Amino acid sequence: MRYPIIQKMKRVIERNQGFDVVIVVASPGNKEYWERRLEVTKNEILSPKTKIIVIEEDWPGRAGQLLGTLYAWKVANEKINLKEILEKKGTLAIYQAAGHGKRMAPLCGTEVNNKSGIKLPKMVKIEDKETPLTVLEAVIFSTQIFAKSREGRITVFWGDQVFIPSGITKRETNLPVEIFGIKKRFSLSKKDWQRDWQQYGILIPTKKRGLLLREKVSWPKIQKLLEKGHLKEDREGKVTLIKSLGCFSISLSFLESLLEEFSKEIEAKRRNLTTDFHLWVPFTSQKKEYQSESGSGIYWERIKKIRKNFIQKTKRKKIIGEKDLGEKTLWWDYGSLKIYFLNLLKLLKKTEEGKVAREFFEAEKYYIGKKIEKDLKIKNSILINSQIGGGKLQNTIFIDSKITWAKIQNGVIISSQAKGIVGPKGKLVKNIFLYNVKEEKLVKVLPAEVVTDIIPAEGTKIRMRTSLFRDGKKDWQVRIPPNIFAYSEIERFLARIANTALKFRT
């Protein structure tokens, strides 16, 4: 079965209808890599016409999505006249791909501190060589469909989240700010709220106060919103809410008002300000409410000034609107190790989402329902550009790997070579993840274990191990046995050699 939205993504590239300018905000040391990589994959990932600008976020302590977006505009505008392009109805997208990627540790170290360079299950050709698609390339490819209807605007995306819209992608509002989300009408329950909504930003449509954005709302706080009348149940006891995707588009005039207000921070490269808590939340809340969420009253006044001045200048009282991408929109987050692993395994599901994932990554042709040979049994698995000599694979994905023997259930093996993969006492091992492992002998793994080799230079190898149940952000400063380095130590070492280490990588 063909899914129209994925076919549309491909046609946008073929018909040269993607964004006119793409700005990638990369971590220090990754600029040259992404400039080369995106140029050579342009006709597969981007329209031929697209101007690619990669900048490094050389900002102490990180800028956050708000200041990072403004800084990206400032630096890129020194290379090309972006304002002139937008005034001529051109299209522009910014992809936020910077950061340590702590929740993906130790994989980011394998990619030389390049979290958006982590691999996905699709091969692309670079100079006659097949190499796995990266996370950033998947995000860029999937979002070019938003270009055509956002002329004269700046559209901002995260560099590690892919979403497949189930609704139309064209812009439906002329408001200065358009926030992407997934609208849903449902019955409130504590269990469902804590499982499906609490960890996200939410957009609340109201008649009196317009669109409200609130960040990571707990169950007691959602009850207060009901009591205050900001959130209302309909006659059937259901509410309508929008789960924010963290992506948005803004008008040139709104961008200019932000640049004016935050010019000092941009010039000095100081502070870390996000778009949700430091822009949309104070923009749509009262002062006391913002302070009750640990927000600064003085800072709230700054946002109030932006709003007041913008309304006086444009004569528009309503500024923020939502863009609903459809209730059945798929959202694949590749920003944390466990979720990345689980989202990859969705390719093996016999569900609608599994079918869409296989089409998006062009993996259907590599799917093996059942295969029995003399020394090898394979069931419900995908092997992409890979070889397996013998053993047993069930619910397992192999990408760009060559393993002589393995016995795995629920596993992901990416860019690895080994004589064999064995569990305790040589038994079948479950829920394992190997990434860039280079081993001439057997690799011994435990259930739910993650193994990767960091190879900063020829002849040098640092093996790192963790568990799918651990949080790399919490472990960032910790040396986890048997690792001889903490993730933070690896990050600092690689930061000194990043451009050199990435120079000859595809």
Image: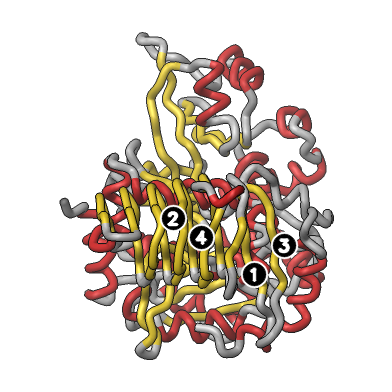
- Label 4: which secondary element: strand
Q: From the top left corner, tell me how far across and down residue 184 is, in percent.
A: 39, 30
Q: Residue at x 42, y 66 (%)?
A: 399
> Would you place residue 248 above or below residue 127 in this image?
above
N-term-proximal mark, 4 vs 1? 4
Residue position marked by numbered label 2 in the rendering: 162
Residue position marked by numbered label 4 in the rendering: 156
> Would you place residue 406 above or below residue 30 in this image?
above
Q: Between marks 1 and 2, how big is the CA–CA gap?
A: 26 Å
N-term-proximal mark, 4 vs 2? 4
N-term-proximal mark, 3 vs 4? 3
Q: Which mark is residue 332?
A: none
The image's colouring method is secondary structure
Left of 147 or right of it: where is 336? Answer: right
Q: Residues within 10 Å of mark 1 (few under 14, many from 20)?
A: many
Q: Between marks 3 and 1, how big is the CA–CA gap?
A: 30 Å
Q: Residue at x 74, y 76 (%)?
A: 494
Q: Are marks 4 and 2 in contact (CB under 8 Å)?
A: no
Q: Which mark is residue 453?
A: 1
- Which three-letter amino acid code belongs to the residue tagged 2? Val
Judge whether residue 178 can be spotted in this image: no
Q: Which mark is residue 63?
A: 3
